[in-house]
């Protein structure tokens, strides 16, 4: 039987060592960390800002850039 704590850890993912584009603050976060919980991003920031959970699947992004995936670029040009 899985406890809720185990289920939470099973549904978590840590992406680390990425170059994260922070649209809101118009900057890149170098060596950034992204915490994914239940398939949603729950936290982002630099390595010192974000507490990284232990015993969770971790992917090293090796300095690659991470960009927001949901940008509404749909427009209609009218005259």
Image (cartoon, grey):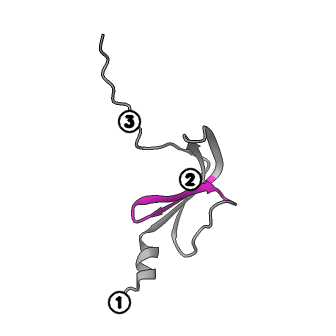
Q: Residue at x 60, y 67 (%)?
A: 52
10 Å neighbourhood of mark 1: few (<14), some, or many (≥20)?
A: few
Q: Label 3's element?
A: loop
Percent of width and height locating residue 65: 56, 43
Q: Which residue is mark 1?
A: 1
Percent of width and height locating residue 39: 39, 61
Q: Which residues are magenta?
A: 32-48
Q: Nearer the viewer, residue 22 or 31?
A: 22
**Residue 61, which numbered label?**
2
Percent of width and height locating residue 70: 40, 43
Q: Against 9, is 33 above or below?
A: above
Q: Tell me the quadrant of the picture where the N terminus can be found.
A: bottom left
Secondary structure of the magenta portion, mostly? strand
Q: Is residue 38 left or right of residue 67?
A: left
Q: Which residue is mark 3?
A: 72
Q: Tell me the quadrant of the picture where the C terminus can be found.
A: top left
- Is 33 one of the magenta-colored residues? yes
- Is there a contact, CB below 8 Å, between mark 3 and mark 1? no
Q: Label 1's element?
A: loop
Q: Label 2's element?
A: loop
- Is 36 one of the magenta-colored residues? yes
Q: Nearer the viewer, residue 53 or 65?
A: 53
| Mark 1 or mark 2, whichever is nearer to me | 1
- Is there a contact, CB below 8 Å, between mark 1 and mark 2? no
Task: Measure the alpha-carbon separation of dots 3 and 1.
Answer: 42 Å
Q: Nearer the viewer, residue 30 or 57?
A: 30
Q: Against 45, is 65 above or below?
A: above
Q: Residue at x 52, y 72 (%)?
A: 56
Residue 33 is at least partly visible in this image: no
10 Å neighbourhood of mark 2: few (<14), some, or many (≥20)?
A: some
10 Å neighbourhood of mark 3: few (<14), some, or many (≥20)?
A: few
């Amino acid at each position: 039987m899985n406890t809720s704590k185990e289920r939470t850890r099973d549904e978590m993912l840590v992406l680390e060592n990425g170059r994260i584009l922070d649209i809101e603050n118009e900057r890149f976060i170098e060596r950034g960390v992204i915490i994914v919980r239940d398939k949603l991003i729950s936290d982002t920031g630099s390595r010192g800002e974000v507490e990284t959970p232990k015993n969770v699947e971790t992917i090293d992004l090796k300095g690659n850039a991470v960009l927001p995936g949901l940008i509404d670029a749909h427009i209609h040009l009218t005259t």
